[in-house]
Amino acid sequence: MQIVAKTFQGLEEILAKELEALGASNINIVSRAVECEGDQQLLYRMNYELRTAVRVLVKFFSFKTKHENHLYKKIQEIDWSEHIALQDTFAIDATTYSKYLTHSKYLSLKVKDAIVDQLREKYDGQRPSIDLNAPTLRLQIHFNKDNQCTVLWDSSGQSLHKRGYRVASVLAPINEVLAAGLILLSGWKGDCPLIDPMCGSGTIPIEAAMYASQIPPQFKRKTFGFMTWKDFDAELWEDVRKTANAKIKMTEVPILGFDRDVNAVKIAEENVDTIGLDEVIEINWRDFLTLPPQTEKGVIIMNPPYDERLGEEDIEAFYRNIGDQLKKSFSGFDAWLISSNLEALKFIGLKPSRKIMLFNAALECRFQKYELYAGTKKIHKAEQ
Ligand SMILES: C[S@@+](CC[C@H](N)C(=O)[O-])C[C@H]1O[C@@H](n2cnc3c(N)ncnc32)[C@H](O)[C@@H]1O
């Protein structure tokens, strides 16, 4: 079958590497997604083991269309009773880049009407219900800019960032999939200490510890869309889970999170406990800016506040202080920092050795690497 894994813009290549490791074939990178071919086992493994996929979809059929009535007709060419039973509930999401069919909500309604009208006739006036929250079947309809409409089954159900460990959260938590993407992009292999000095609800340390301990990202999650499909193979699913879980080996490398907000520390600790990583991750109530020079070398991955809304009155001075502290106390570290505040990033005052463009939802961000060594010089904003 043809499978599409959706992701964040900027994480496509990392996701393709994950797919390669799972043994997928014909891997093809597209915008915000990676396509591949595989069987049911791969489909289950993709849902359970991919750290950087948001959703896993299976291509159903595809056709060109520019007109809503033509869309309705093409959708009705499928015998939907072969796929949707009367007791099923379903939901349809649409995305469109077509210049003719532009309103995604309207398009999903049109497709829903085509399916329901056909099924009502088939089931003597009765029809399956729509359930937008927890349907047994979810369809995605995608219209590209060349007017190609593709209908896909959503095998994930809820978005895969819902790993099941985040029981509490701070104001601006980073998405779990993005956090995992940052860790993989940084090249950290779990072979040296990792610190998130502004850890909020603990997402980066948790994703790092799960990766380093080979804990499948969906270890805590109980439900996936494919479980309510007609062809759900419970034995195969159990086998996929057991095989992946057998690789778990708790890391012994220190993974640390700090936050200056005592409430964030409590939240992070709760999340860490939920996933059972309290012996691997240490969360501390500390102000990053006052940490003493570190003796052990390692990797920093941080997601500082982007703007004044998160309580920083002078955001430029805040970023300048981060740069000073990195230089002063983290010699020998590689520090990675993600922010959408491109102006404030210049005030770090250190020369990044890598800059990666990423999207955090709609926010365009930079994920920048600073290699800190004893002679690292602070540079002036103008020089950057
Ligand atoms: C954008 S949030 C981080 C969100 C986090 N990645 C998560 O997934 O929940 C920024 C965090 O930085 C913390 N923070 C801001 N200044 C700090 C400082 N000087 N030292 C430690 N933490 C700080 C805030 O308390 C907040 O929790």
Image (tube, rainbow, N blue to C red):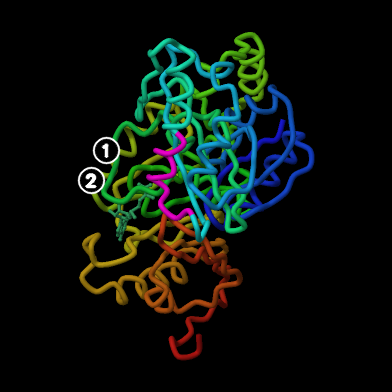
Q: Which residues are magenta?
A: 101-111
Q: Is residue 338 left or right of residue 211?
A: left
For the point 59% across and 22% down, which residue is it? 79
**Does residue 174 sit above or below 234 in this rendering?**
below
Which amino acid type is shown beneath numbered disc 1? Lys
Of 317 and 81, which appears nearest the observer? 81
Q: Looking at the picture, tell me which residue is in the foreground, 69 or 170.
A: 69
- Badge 1 is on which residue? 266
Residue placed at 66% from the left, 13% from the top? 236
Left or right, 325 with respect to 290, comes to right
The answer to if 23 sits in the magenta stretch is no
**Residue located 45% across and 20% down the image:** 136
Q: Position of residue 226 (x, y in %)?
A: 55, 22
> Measuring 48% from the left and 46% from the top, which residue is drawn there?
68
**Image check: 139 left or right of 273?**
right
The answer to whether residue 100 is above or below residue 18 is below
Q: Image quarter for residue 23?
A: top right
**The residue under label 2 is which amino acid type?**
Val
User: Which is nearer the eye, 14 or 293?
Assistant: 14
Residue 109 is a magenta residue:
yes
Image x and y of residue 22, in percent: 72, 34
Mark 1 secondary-structure assignment: helix
List x then y, in percent, for residue 231: 62, 14
Label 2 element class: helix
Q: What residue would you read off at disc 2? A: 262
**1 and 2 marks in contact (CB < 8 Å):** yes
